[in-house]
Amino acid sequence: MREIDIDQLATKIDRAAVVDVREPAEYAEGHVPGAVNIPMGRLTDRLGELDRDRPVYVVCASGNRSSAMVDVLTAAGFDAVNVAGGTSAWVRSGRPVER
C-alpha cells in the first residue's frame, strides 16, 4: 500500500483528488480543503465518481479506515494512496480545514 504523510499531501493538495471516507458528521466537523466525502460504506457504490486518471489520496480521522479503503480502490484499478495520520494530523499541524 502506498502512503504519504500530511506534509506530502499539502504539496499536492491543489492538484489532488482527496477522498475523505469518514461519516458525514465527522466530515462536517472539519476536513482537508477540497476533500470529497464518500463514507467508506458507500465507496464501492460511488467508484464512478472518481477519476481513474489521477491519483486518489484517501483520508479518514487517523489513517486506519483510509488504509483499508486504499486496498479497495487499488483492487478496483485506481492509483490510491493512504494519508497517514489523517485529518487529525492535518488539524494538529495547524493547516486550514473546511467546515
Image: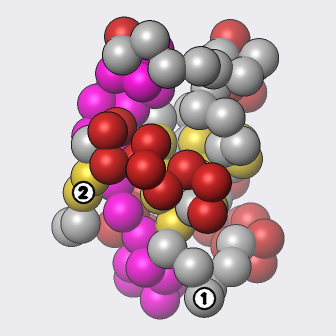
Q: What residue is at 59 percent from the left and 32 percent from the top?
A: 32
Q: 44 and 5: which one is in front?
A: 5
Q: Position of residue 30 (x, y in %)?
A: 65, 17
Q: 40 above or below 90?
A: below
Mark 1: which amino acid?
Asp
Query: What residue range appears in magenta?
Result: 73-91
Q: CA distance from mark 1 to mark 2?
A: 18 Å
What amino acid type is highlighted by mark number 2? Glu
CB within 8 Å, label 1 to label 2: no
In the image shown, does 23 or 33 lie closer to the viewer?
33
Q: Is residue 83 magenta?
A: yes
Please provide percent x and percent y for residue 99.
Answer: 77, 17
Quadrant for the N terminus, please.
bottom left
Residue 80 lies, in percent from the top left, at 42, 70
Pointer 1 residue: 53
Locate residue 71 relative to residue 54 in the image: left or right. Answer: left
Disc number at residue 3?
2
> Label 1: how many residues lie within 10 Å, few (<14), some (14-19) or many (20+)?
few
Q: Is residue 66 visible?
A: no
